[in-house]
Structures are given as C-alpha cells and as structure tokens.
Image (cartoon, grey):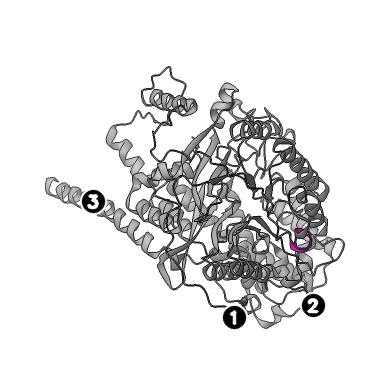
Amino acid sequence: MSQYYFPIVFVFLLEILRLAQSHPFLFNSGNQQRRPQVEWKTPEDNWTAEAAPRSIYPLLQNQYNKHQLPPTNRYEVIEGDEDEKLLRRMHEARENATARTLFYSTKEESHLPPLLTKTIKYFNLQQVAFELETSVMSQVSCTACKAGAGLLQHYIRTGKSKEEIIKMIYQYCVNLKIQSARVCEGVSQLFGVEVIYVLKRITIGPDEICSFIIGDACGDIYNPYHEWEVEFPPVPKPDPRELGLPKEAAPVFKVLHLSDTHFDPYYAEGSNADCNEPLCCRLTNGRPTTPNGAAGKWGDYRKCDTPQRTVDHMLNHIADTHADIDFIIWTGDLPPHDVWNQTKEENLKVLKETVQQMTEKFPGIPIFPALGNHESAPVNSFPPPYVQQVDSSIAWLYDELDVQWRRWLPASVSHTVRRGAFYSVLVRPGYRIISLNMNYCNNKNWWLLLNSTDPATELQWFIYELQSAEFAGEKVHVIGHIPPGHSDCLKVWSRNYYRIVSRFESTITAQFFGHTHFDEFEVFYDPLDLSRATSIAYIGPSVTPYNDLNPGYRIYYIDGDHDETTRLVVDHESWIMNLKEANLYDYPIWYKLYSTRAAYGMKGLRPADWDQLINNMTDSKELFDLYYKHYWKNSPVKPECDYECRKRILCDAKSGRSHDRKYFCEVVEAKIDESNKGWKDWLFSSISSSYVLYKKLF
C-alpha cells in the first residue's frame, strides 16, 4: 500500500488541520472536556484469590523420558542418526551449490559499478524510507487518535445518538481512504458500540486516552486514573542464588510450543494476495491483477493467513517427527486477521474446530493453552468481570473456553477460567504452569479505559499462586500471549508484572509468549541492578506467515524429574517451512532452522546466558545477523537491518518492561552508536578530503 500512503496522509493531515481550526476542543484538555456524561463507578467485586480452588494433583504422569538433546556443535552428527547425516549432506551440497542445485540464493546481482553498489548498500535507502514511513505513521496515528477521541467525546456530549456517531465514524473512514468501504463499515459497526459506551463513562481527555492506547509514540502522559500497584504478602524474598547449569544427561521433558496459528477457513489459492485490506488471499479480494499477485497453494508472504492444508500438514509432520513430546504449550491467536468481519459465532467455530483437531492429532498428550487477543469479537475486546450486560459481557467466550480447555485441564481451573481465562496447574510434583490472560494488559482493549486497576484481580491472584508455590518449593513456568515487554502491553500493568517476576525470581524459571510472530526473547533484570539478569521470556514464532514470514514452531527441552532439577529450559529448536519452495515445487518440507546452544555458542539458557548473548550481539554484527535471520524465520523477503534496526531489536530483547526503553537500552544503544560512529566519521572525512582536493584542482 506504499503507493497510496503519502496521498492518504496528506489528505488526512489537511482534514486534521481543518478540524483543529474549526473544532479547537479536539486538542484542548481543559476541565470542560473532562466533564463526565454518565455517572458511573466501577461496580464492587468481592472476589478474592483465596476463594479459587488450587490444582494440587500432578497432571502429567512421569515417564522418565530421556530425550536426546540437540548437538551443541553446529555441524556435529549424532552417531547412527540418519536424519542428521542427511541434513549434513544437504548443508555440504548447499555450500558447494551450482546453478543446477535447487536452493534459494540470497546473492543479489548488480549491473552497477562495484563502488556504487557498495555505496547504495551502505546508505540502505529502502530501509531509510521504511523507517521514515514508520515514524511519520506513528505521529499521524497519535494526531488522528487525539482528533478522533476529541470529536467522539464532543458528539457524545452534544447528544448525538449511537447510530449517528457510528455513521460518522464510517464516513470519516471512507472519505479519508483509511480503508475500503466494506472494511470501514465493519469496523464502525463492530467497534463503535463499545467505544461509545466507554467514552460516555470516562472523565479523561484525548491526550490521556491516546497516551494510554498508543503508548510511547503518543507521549508518556501522567494519568492519575490509571496508576496502581499490587500488594505483596509480608514474606521476605529469599536470597537469590546463582543458577548452575542443568545436570548433563539428566531426564528432560520435550515440549512443543505453538502460537499464532491464525487459521483462515476462507483462504483461496490463486486469489488476490496483494489487496488493499488488512487480510488478503480470499475470493472476496477478487482476481489478481498480475501473475505474481496470486495467492500460493501453501500460503503467502503478503497479508495472508494460514490455509487449512498448511495447518494439517504441519500437525501431521509434528505428530510423525516429534511423537515423543511430553506436553504442548499453546499461546493463542486462532482466528484470522479479518477483524472487520468477525462474529462471536465464527470465532467460536474456529476455536472448537482447532481444539478438536489438536485433540485428534495428539491423543493423550496434555495441552496447556493461553488466550490470544484475536479470540474475541471484536478483536482486543475483553471487558473485566464487572461488565455483565448481555451484549457486552465476555462470558460467551470464557464459558466456552472452560468447556474446550477441560479436555486437557483439571476441574479446579474452571473457577478462574470462567472469571478471567487464567489458571494454574500442577504438572509434576514441584513443577507448576500458570497461564495468564494477557489481554488485561492490552492497551488496545478499550474496556481498560474504564478502570485498568488489576482487571479481574488477575495479578493479585498470580501473586497468591506464586507465594503458595514458593512455600511448597515448586518451580513455575508462566505462559501467555502478549509479551509483557511489548509496546501493546500497558505500562502500569507491565510495571507491576515486572515487580512480581523480580520478587519471585527463584520460583519462576521460564516464561513463554507469542503475539509478535517473530522468533525472539525478552530478558528481565533486577530493578536495582541492571547488570543482573533474573528471568527469561521465550517468544515463540508464529504458524501464520502473516506477513513476510515462514511458518514455524518451537521445541523446548526442559530439565525434568531428578533430585537436582532446575526446571530451566536446557535447549530449544525452531522449525520452519520454506514457503517459497513449498509453493514453487508443491512440496512443503519442515526442517530444523537452528538449535539455540549450537547456533549461538551458549553454555546454557539461564537468564545470565541470554544477557551475555545480547552483549555479544551488540559487539558482533556477524552474530546479530545470524539472530536476525532466525528472528525472521529465514524469510527470503525479510528487510535489510541497519544499525537503527539493530538497536531496536536488541532493545526489545532487553525490555521485559514495556514503554521503558530508555531505562534498559541506554548502554546497548550507545555501543552500537559508537561502532557506527567510525563509518560516519570516515564518510565525513572522505567527503571533506574530496572537497579540499576539488578546491585545489579547480
């Protein structure tokens, strides 16, 4: 859509300027604007964490599985392992590939002089344009948010009806060419009702609203209505002990991590993959205008979700290749990205069909799910328990989740799943999994504008579970969807979560999330000593290729049942399917992209080891480039990454707390700036020398 971007922005800015001149109240945060239209207070909620039943019987029967860990040397071949030998031969063939070898080549041919080619690569003009567009988009989004929120609040106060306001939302969307007419209609109808409901009941103005929703890009504005802190029991924190490496040759659990399936039941091979809507590759997108614009059989790198055949093929491959997995963690986002066109019935259908398929493909294997932000209709809409009106309550989803998830989970989880879609399960003696509903930290969840104070009392319950686990000597793994350090997570919620992880660093030994679609991680640090890493969050790759990605999944090897177990992740592998080759040869192949310890030369996967990896990637561009390849799941259409991109990605890895990048990233950014400074100085010096020589000659 880049060809339409600048005209749309120009028209949009003109419209905003007109609005600012004719409606000064849009950008005015005075007391008059804060006057509430509805007398509304948060209903009392007397629910307590202690009232929830606890899982006290181990769910997983111990089989003392001794799975074979991945090789720690990159090209080490396990004796007698034919698959590893085949992969080694394929690697050697690729290293010595000729023009007749069917491997994707990343080498770019250039017909320009070598010096000019190197200069263009150095300036990386395409990436510069991309960064500029992203920056402008953020500013425009903030301005549009303030204008839209102010205008809506004005219309509400002047007595406009719900129908009139929804009609105006639609007209603005169409006239400013923000989306197609049908997308504008769907969005205004789906989201208009709850947005109007919320805006009628809040007393804050556009500045606070948009800072809350957009985050850093719209300023960090203090908002007294959304400042709160969780309470900890009066129990001293145990002295942290230095973590040793897991015991060699000890039993391990083999665990599958699936995330962000985004199964699209209406995906159509050959349909238009290059449309101007949030989701393409459907018959409703029409015929492609060029041969290259047609959707591939197994998926597409453009704005398209996962076809049924690709999901089926992946699950069959996993069932055959990893028949020895002990359990599965499944971190949400099942429906596709047609967010303007979704219904509760359609999303429940996707949920039921996907759960049924997982049950059939992995019989007898426990599955621990977490709720994604796309499961609701409309997307991101997760009202707290005190919202109980029939047309607004989230009970339609949580009640069905309880029914579906109970295929794998004990009856004790029903109470908290129906309340807030979170639960705690004892997996093995001394080993517990806690699944959090991260939509209560989602800053796109408009309901939180009413009251963001620990929605559903989830974090207070989380503390209760962790304190009980600490007393019982249990180690805990946390699973969820939105990573707590991601910009989509509310700053106040993320700050409280970070405090909890810090307090219970000896109990929480790993965290697992999804949402970003990339293959990455987040490190947590001692708030009083940023040189000491305390926890690690693994962010699993998406199954969907949306967008510019290969489909993927993760396998973890977790320290198992033995006297000295740490319950740490010992190693993990990322597996992908090369979508380009699958569509080209109609033969999808899933293969191991990398195993972590071998790829990065890590002794272990302790928090300190991940912190050291960040430091090593800061110092070594070659190592970072390898990580960047894995981050994009070896996508052939991944963008180039300049030093600003490198700073952003490494800063993401250091930020387990959202909207606080300056606090965590100063050292990393300074190092990368310093390493880049030499090139800038060299370029400036070269230009200066050339100018002096020119003056002497002429």
Which residue is more in the foreground, 58 or 114? Answer: 58
- Camera-side mark, 1 or 2: 1
The answer to whether the residue labelled 2 contacts the one labelled 3, judged by CB atoms less than 8 Å apart, is: no
Which class describes the residues within 10 Å of circle 2: few (<14), some (14-19), or many (20+)?
few
- Front of the two marks 2 and 3: 2
Q: Give the tally of numbered discs.
A: 3
Percent position of residue 231, x then y: 62, 77
Q: Which residue is mark 3?
A: 682
Task: Identify the image quadrant of the N terminus.
Answer: top right
Three-letter amino acid code of the residue under disc 2: Glu
- Left or right of 547 in this view: 458: right
Query: Which residue is at a point 55% across and 55% down the rendered structure image?
Result: 137
Query: Gap in Å between the C-alphas at discs 1 and 2?
Result: 26 Å
In this view, the residue farthest toward the left is 696
Vertical position of residue 447 compared to residue 31: above or below: above
Q: Earlier in the sequence, mark 2 or mark 3?
A: 2
Q: Badge 1: few (under 14), some or many (20 or more) residues near its Cα, within 10 Å?
A: few
Give the magenta-colored segment's residue range: 413-420
Residue with the mark numbered 1: 234
How many angstroms separate mark 2 from mark 3 (CA)?
Answer: 65 Å
Query: Pointer 3: residues within 10 angstroms few (<14), some, or many (20+)?
Result: few
The three-letter amino acid code for the residue at tag 3 is: Trp
Residue 23 seen from this side? no
| Nearest to viewer (mark 3 / mark 1) | 1
Q: Which residue is mark 2?
A: 44
Q: Tell which of 300 and 36 is nearer to you.
A: 300
